[in-house]
Amino acid sequence: MATTDRPGRGVYTRQNFLSIYLPSIALAMGTGIVVPALPVYARSFGVSFEVASLVIIVQQLGHTIVAYPTGLLMDRFGRRKVVLAGPILMALSSFLAAMAGSFPELLIYRFIGGIGEQMWRVGRLTMIADTGADRERGRQITTMSAMESSGRLFAPMIGAFIALFWDIRAPFIAHGVLCLIAIIPSFLLIRETAPHLIKVGANGRPAPTKAPDAGMRALLVFPIVIFFTAQFFASFARGPIFTGQLNFYGTYAYDLGPQNIAMLATITTAVAIPMSLASGYIMDHFGRKATLVPGLTLLTVAFGFLGLTAIFHMPFEAFMIAYLAVYACTAMTGGNMQTLGSDIAPASARGRFYGVSHMIGNIGGPLATAAFAALSAGFGYWSAFAFLGFTAGAAALILGTQVRDRVRAERKAEEGAVVAASSSGGVVAPPAGAVEELAGTSNRSST
């Protein structure tokens, strides 16, 4: 079986650092800087807690609404313009937010910021899927995730310092400036990567071309529909984790204060960075499901442990162990679904594939958060954790039995060829695609 690996430019190159990893750090840092100022700024408009919470909800609404249109735009008109426009919209929304004269104004600007953030994320993942080699994309995507975690590590403290010594609006200005700085190298380095918009001409340079658009039909096939189903369950399982709902549980069940929550958040972020990098290496060398299925399975166990802490009212130390286990499993699977998706996303509809993928994630997360709250109120915390464990286990089962891991299959085929050649005394040929990968590094267009 021949590998379908595509030529790549490497994972930790100067080009990837300036066009993927550095912007990821800067954008995440800017978002984190705004975090401590946002509640206080919203309250300054004289609104209640429930109304102030809309500043978070409208941003998530922007994420959800724009996900599929972003993919559609990329498939029709290309990736580059969308990727460059995202951080510019984020910067514009932050500058305007700093000058908001009313709370409804602030909500509009936060909604625009959510649109820009989603455009950047969907666009970069699609470009990585376009250009990254099969044995590189796992590390590229998880490194991007790790860089975002790095950017968020100390950003809230920086934001609090800026707000305290300057003005409550100053963190929004800082966010906007960081967004613009982050995208400057991309204007010089990013080239169009959409397969249906470029081809290599006789001179070896990309030349524009046109090809028929397969549309949504390309996504309505068995492996992709099954993948989206598994992703929906996975987004349910991880939704309350990403929204910080476990912190609410810790506050109500164990009377945790801001210092305790900050300590747990710092520990989990510090653990997540090396785990994300390690999972990318494992995915590229041993297959995508080598971390994804075990990670989701262990997440099921971790949620079960949290359920036991609720049933038996275990001490804080037991809760902390279960809490850290949940976040460790989340870090182990972070970026893995997107990497697995990059293997099956059709070339003619990669933008729409990632648009639908992010839309599913953005819908599943809030639904799971609402379900967690409803189950906790109706039956107790244990039932909410049992529900999350069930969804994580369902995702692991579907992925483990119904979705093919192409990289793992290719690795087994290569190992089988080596064993067969060794037993027969023959010469082992290099895997198909290796020569192309070496040759492609000299003339491949930039990511």
Image (spheres, rainbow, N blue to C red):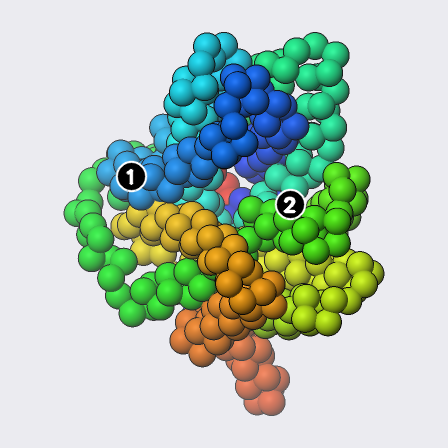
Distance CA(mark 1)–CA(mark 2): 27 Å
Amino acid type, label 2 = Ala
Compared with 81, 176 (above or below) is above
Left or right relative to 180: residue 197: left
Q: Quadrant of the N terminus?
A: bottom left
Residue 123 position in % (x across, y down): 41, 38
Residue at image location 24% in from the left, 57% down from the top: 218
Vertical relation: 131 (above or below) 373: above
What residue lies at 27% left-to-right and 50% top-to-bottom? 348
- Determine whether, in the image, residue 87 is placed left or right of residue 62: right
Residue tagged 1: 69
Q: Dot 1 surroundings within 10 Å: few (below 14), some, or many (20 or more)? A: some
Give residue 171's quadrant in the image.
top right
Mark 1: amino acid: Pro
Residue under the point 20% across and 50% down:
215
Q: How would you rate the neighbour count of disc 2 (Cα within 10 Å): few for under 14, some for 14-19, many for 20 or more?
A: many
- Give percent across and percent down for residue 385: 58, 65
**Which one is nearer the viewer's eye here, 152 or 16?**
152
Q: Which residue is mark 2?
A: 146
Residue 362 image offset from top left, x and y in percent: 42, 47
Q: Secondary structure at mark 2?
A: helix
Instruction: Report the mark closest to the observer, 1 or 2.
Output: 1
Q: Residue furthest left?
A: 212
| Residue located at (43% from left, 54% from top) | 367
